[in-house]
Amino acid sequence: MLLRLASHPLCFALLLVGLVGCSKNPPVNTTMMETEFAEQLLAPPNYLAGLVKQTPDVKFQPMAGGIRKASSQVRLPTGESMTVWVYQPDPLPPGKLPCVFIAPAGTMLIHGMMLSDGDVQEHLPWAKAGFAVVAYELSGHADAEKSSDDQLKLAADNFRDAKSGLLNAQVAMAFAKEKLSFVDPDQFYTAGHSSAGTMALYVAEMEPRVKGSIAFMPAVDVRATLGLDVMTYLQTRSILTEAGPYVSAISPATHIERLSRPTFIFLSANDRSDINGPADTFVAKLRELGKDVTVVRAPGGGHLEPMLDPGIPMAIEWLKMVTQSR
């Protein structure tokens, strides 16, 4: 999904960088790892499982091409709810299916994003290939083209309350485990394009249940992608407090040591330099650390089209090899 930027003053600043980081209302004085560990200690046992069990059973409808789809509203611990779309092959193959979790692309990462019809083209190939798919929203939806600073700040607060999208992913995984009997809870994988690729890597770093991740054209260093002008705008307009520490804290490059599972990264040779430059450094560091990483670089095509073809077909074949080896 491409982000359309026009009338909002922030949009002009973002036009060249295209992707923005996210914020945390209180100053960031602890690392994400420390925060996550503290929340795990304080959270009631099986809290998310109990929460998602309240969701009505999903009702699938047939789609063309041997797929069935269901939509469900899942409650979040914040008191809000998010939409999830579930896809399954039709008919279901024997045994339990590996499950791919996909967030919507197009967010500036200071806010969330709702699912839209344009996302479906990224979902269907996985189900056609025999995987279960759970597409989930990111809390704090905003329209970067139309939102005022106050609206963006409110969206950023909601996104922040959902742990910058991590809580959305964790609830989606709890939903899959508790409500989708055909899903293998020991084979959860994340995937996504652009900002959703950033999210796929970040969730894989922070959530131990993830067994592998696939990122198409991700911004692995959100600070580098933002640039000084955009970060200054967000900070001075009080849209994003403690901008520097926070965008570093949610960048996959910051937590690269935690990326312990197989990783597939797809890049385009003529994509933006703020994507490719940090990604090259990220990949080199992964290899230096001895991580299991597969990198494919399309010879051209820009930021979107190569993801659809050949990116997703190649990633599907890679994931089939990963799941068969387990």
Image (spheres, grey):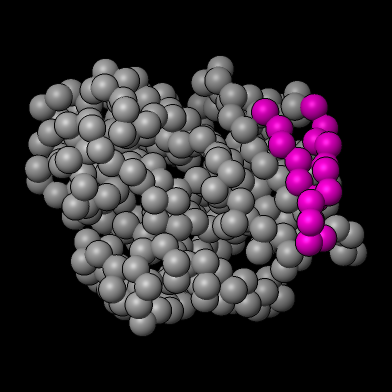
Q: Is residue 180 left or right of residue 237?
A: right
Taking depth in this image into account, of 81 and 6 the one nearest to the observer is 6
Taking depth in this image into account, of 305 and 78 the one nearest to the observer is 305
Q: Is residue 57 left or right of residue 99?
A: right
In magenta segment, residue 169? no
Residue 277's quadrant in the figure? bottom left
Q: Residue at x 51, y 35 (%)?
A: 114
User: Magenta span covers which residues?
Assistant: 56-73
Which residue extends farthest front? 7
Q: Is residue 114 left or right of residue 140?
A: right
Q: Residue at x 45, y 71 (%)?
A: 306
Count of marks overlaid on the render: 0
Residue 195, position in %: x, y? 39, 51
Vertical arrangement, residue 282 with respect to residue 74, above or below: below
Q: Residue at x 45, y 57 (%)?
A: 193
Vertical arrangement, residue 158 with respect to residue 207, above or below: above
Vertical arrangement, residue 264 with respect to residue 203, above or below: below
